[in-house]
Amino acid sequence: MDNENELRQAQSAECARQPIGVVLEIAGSGSAIALDLERLNECMADIDPSIALAGQVGSQIKIKTNDGWLLASVRNQRQDRRGDGNSIVANIDFLGEGMEERLTGKIHSFRRGVTRYPIPGALVYPATSEDLRQIYASDGRSSIQIGTVYPTSDIRAGMYIDAMLGKHFALLGSTGTGKSTSAALILHRICQAAPQGHILMIDPHGEYSAAFRSTGQIFDVSNLQMPYWLMNFEEHCEVLLKSSGNDLQNDRDILAKCLLAARGKNRLAEQLGKITVDSPIPYLLSDLTGMIQDEMGKLDKATNTAPYMRIKTKVDELKSDPRYQFMFSGMLVSDTMADFIGKIFRMPSGGKPISIIDVSGVPSDITSTVVAVLSRLVFDFAIWSRNEKTSPILLVCEEAHRYVPNERNADGNSVGTVLSRIAKEGRKYGISLGLITQRPSDLAEGVLSQCGTIISMRLNNDRDQAFVKAAMPEGARGFLDSIPALRNRECIICGEGVSIPIRVSFDNLEESKRPASEDPSFVDLWNTGGGEEDMVQRTVQRWRAQGS
């Protein structure tokens, strides 16, 4: 048996030494090569999975240069009609170059980019698993291991944390491709590498609570206790004003005047001297309605009191509605700003570096405002703590297309403005943005192009595929063509977080660390029965209580 193995390895080494084609033409980012069909068929039987895939779409090949090797990935193939049918023409994208060890012929010192191009007629060879090991080897920067490099089963795929977080990242993939589990895997690995980190995740469906029970703090409407006075003027308008046109401008003027007066009643305001309507200073809701009442009393009889009544009624409604208690309860007036920020930004982290903000229980009409307040707090905190020893914060946004929609779907909410600003300016202040979405084409265009690392799982929609291709660097085009062919829990990563674009099979995540996003099995559940009456009763009770 050993002899047979040695023989096959010797054959594999010999196969790697034989060329499989020649370079036909050279262009800046990609070029064309001609491949010998017989040689490709020989390679397919090789025991090395990298050699077995040589020359196929998405595989790597190498080209001999004077003092080393050029690595390229195959973008497409077509039959050479001019020849005898034994030749295939393929387009390739250059990945980078490495030096050759004189004695062994192995690649070392691999780096991205090309300094010396080959000339037409240069020979093309299959890249071996050993070559790929050199290419994908970490260059010493701190990295996290998230899976294995396709097509091998043992070469680990790493991502450089600083480069990935420093320039933002996006995780894209259609529903059902394993996106939530992959997001949980990446965040778990970051938490392991940086246990004193500060990660804030907006979770719109309550999926991630199960995944981070041991490494994170879970906040939902029962324990978030987010003070309403942290909202700035724009966010107050979103929650309190529902009018439009001229009425809206009129209502805004009234609210600005009364809100400033209500904030001014606090002792803090007296100490500060000068405050604005945006200053995060506690005020009583009863003071706000009192101010509105006073202003209404000053009007002469002919003036319309409707705008004042509209705002006052809305404030009273929020105070009495149990669904809004997490934000508008009477308990939230004391100055808890430092405690609240320390709690949700994990400062100190206490061994739980991630806070999951589950907004699934938040009433839908103010969900985007709650996300806007949390995102803006991250940004404002980063700006005002510039003189301190910086504590970078990672803000991860699941279902990002809901919050930063493109112009066609824009609804004018302030959350889109805040997240776009973080995408453009956040890295100067030590804020990293992680966007997770299944509809990249519904995202604001400028935001995706600000993401330095793109992790793309399978995308079934043509528009989404085209959108991602436009956002990715030129050299990754060959990989991108395989996006529709990816299996579940496979992805293509390109950009700052990796040295060169790679196709990765994600690691398995232990059951206890997975998000609760498994699809129910209809057949199993519809084949078991019992207890439905009680279940309906309990559901109706919870429904009526509405979380109170």
Image (spheres, rainbow, N blue to C red):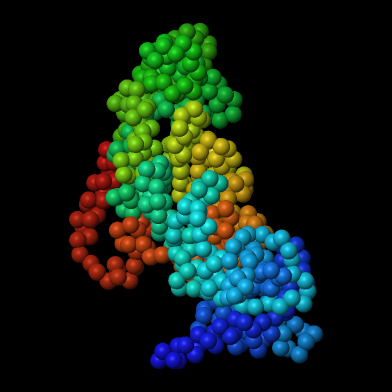
Q: Position of residue 544 (x, y in %)?
A: 28, 43
**Residue shown at the point (43%, 23%) measured from the top left:** 280
**Residue shown at the point (65%, 78%) measured from the top left:** 125
Give the position of the N terminus as an image quadrant: bottom left
Q: Nearer the viewer, residue 164 or 379?
A: 164
Q: Nearer the viewer, residue 196 or 431?
A: 196
Q: Is residue 378 visible?
A: yes
Q: Residue furthest front?
A: 103
Q: Position of residue 22 (x, y in %)?
A: 73, 79
Please give left or right for residue 225 compared with residue 38 in the image: left
Please give left or right for residue 211 compared with residue 405 in the image: left
Q: Position of residue 254 (x, y in %)?
A: 51, 18
State whether residue 545 is above or below residue 144: above
**Residue shown at the point (77%, 84%) measured from the top left:** 81
Q: Is residue 418 visible?
A: no
Quadrant in the picture for residue 479: bottom right
Please give left or right for residue 548 compared with residue 93 in the image: left
State whether residue 150 is above or below residue 533: below
Give the position of the C terminus as an image quadrant: top left
State whether residue 114 is above or below residue 193: below
Q: Position of residue 533 (x, y in %)?
A: 21, 58
